Image (cartoon, rainbow, N blue to C red):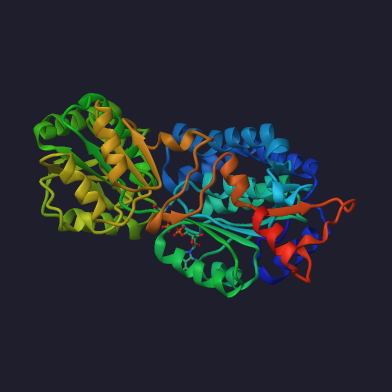
Amino acid sequence: MATTKPDPPSTVAALRRSFEAGLTRPLEWRRAQLIALKDLLRHGEDALIDAMRVDLGKPAVEIRLTDLSFVAAEIDVMLRHLDAWASPERVRVPLTQRPGQATIVREPFGVALVIAPWNYPVHLLLLPMAAAIAAGNCVVGKPSEVSPKTSAALATLARRYLDPRAVAIVEGGPEETRELLEQRFDTIFYTGNGRVGRTVMEAAARHVTPVTLELGGKSPAIVDADADIDISARRVAWGKFLNAGQTCVAPDYVLVHERVERTFVDALARTLRSFYGDDPKRSRDYARIVNDRHFERLSGLLAATSGTVACGGEHDRAQRYLAPTVVTDVPPGDPLMDDEIFGPILPVLRVRDMDEAVRYVSSRTKPLALYIFSSSKTTVDRVLASTSSGSVGVNLTVQQLAIPGLPFGGVGESGMGAYHGRHGFETFSHRRAVFSKPTLLDPPVQYPPYTKIKEWILKKML
Ligand code: NAD
């Protein structure tokens, strides 16, 4: 394993030598590294859970579900399909170009850089790294300094389990990331906020390096009057308050049909009591805000909103605890509606009908996810046809990302590119076009001089 003391130029140079020597291309090497990653997750489980509990106060069940088992299950998918994904793909050759054989060959780009955030610190680092390895790349992983214990645990475990000639973890913050970004990578995969995403893209432009940007945004949940209100409230509450709202695909706000607003808000309050009891601060199943800066930002939003706190609102700076909070009577221009909330505050906006909901969503930047709760297929289809988002959940939240066959990524300001399952393999592969012809025949029709008869034949053929 390469050094954790950041020395980006020599780390990248060493990995590039390994790539050029062909170390990472054989499928056996890739398979062995994917299995090693699974070992890392299994044997490192206690260390990673301890670290994430310190960094984020996350419940152990949520850590297993959303960080550790999730990545292990995705690696299983990679192991199962690696041979098929990596096989050359034959494509049809038009009559005019026959005889010949055309194939798409998936090749690794070379040395990949994966930059991860803090909110799912294992998942968002190791899953793209696994996809990069499956596709045959060398890879540098950069965990977030905002979750320092997890970053250190990942670096130690990676040193123990992964091939140091091809996989490196570089710890550090913005400065180390900037230093990394000065190096030439062959592909960059960044997860985090859009401001840094733009910096990543600018740095990548200097070397014409392709980028995947997994960003955020305000993901709406639309609840129509005909939805099953109890189930909608439960599924919205689960997706929103998981990891104390610090989830990129959490429903950021709710647009609810005015006829069911009251019932929906009551159902949310009931659900929260059933999830976390009367005092969520004492619940073992409720996480904390990651740091003081984010705590100040969120409590500032609560102070600034002109909405009504329908439930929650309590906070405790010493513990960075912010109760699961639902805010009603939120006007469209409220401070809660400016930026992604990324915390346990759920604004509920009432709409007269689904057209108003669609107009509101379409007037904003394209979100990472959109959730629609309705029992009418016509309504669902109409919302889908008139909006855009990275992904959609119908009568659910967050779970769309657990389907490995579905691409996970944003659109517009919520990002570009995608991963999960085969999509991750594709993201870290160059699709090389290969066309080969036998030399047995070589009709002179395409070669100069272009006589009248050749011109006539070419016209007929094309
Ligand atoms: P963060 O602060 O950990 O930053 C992400 C990475 O960028 C870190 O590795 C950090 O070191 C680096 N970084 C930070 N500032 C930098 C700078 N000035 N220059 C260079 N590098 C810098 O995480 P965050 O941005 O707070 O993450 C939360 C955001 O990420 C939210 O907007 C959320 O929606 C989004 N997110 C998206 C996904 C997704 O899959 N689409 C997943 C999780 C989070």
Percent coordinates x, y for residue 352 in the rendering = 10, 41
Tell me which image quadrant ligand 1 sits in.
Answer: bottom left
99, 445: nearer the viewer: 445
| Count of picture labels | 0
Describe residue 9's horizontal placement relative to residue 254 as left or right.
Answer: right
Q: Residue at x 18, y 39 (%)?
A: 354
Q: State which quadrant residue 257 falls in.
A: top left
Q: State which quadrant residue 245 falls in.
A: top left
| Residue 188 higher or lower than 240, as above or below | below
Percent coordinates x, y for residue 368 in the rendering = 38, 49
Q: Residue at x 46, y 63 (%)?
A: 197
Describe residue 419's horizontal placement relative to residue 266 as left or right.
Answer: right
| Residue 243 higher or lower than 337, as above or below | above
Percent coordinates x, y for residue 452 in the rendering = 72, 66
Image quarter (top left, top right, bottom left or bottom right) of the C terminus: bottom right
Which residue in the rendered view is the most extreme toward the front? 452
Q: Residue at x 85, y 56 (%)?
A: 442
Q: State which quadrant residue 328 falls in.
A: top left
178, 276: nearer the viewer: 178
Percent coordinates x, y for residue 244 in the rendering = 34, 43
Does residue 187 appear anywhere in the picture? yes
412, 119: nearer the viewer: 412
Image quarter (top left, top right, bottom left or bottom right) of the N terminus: bottom right
Describe residue 81's horizontal placement relative to residue 149 as left or right.
Answer: right
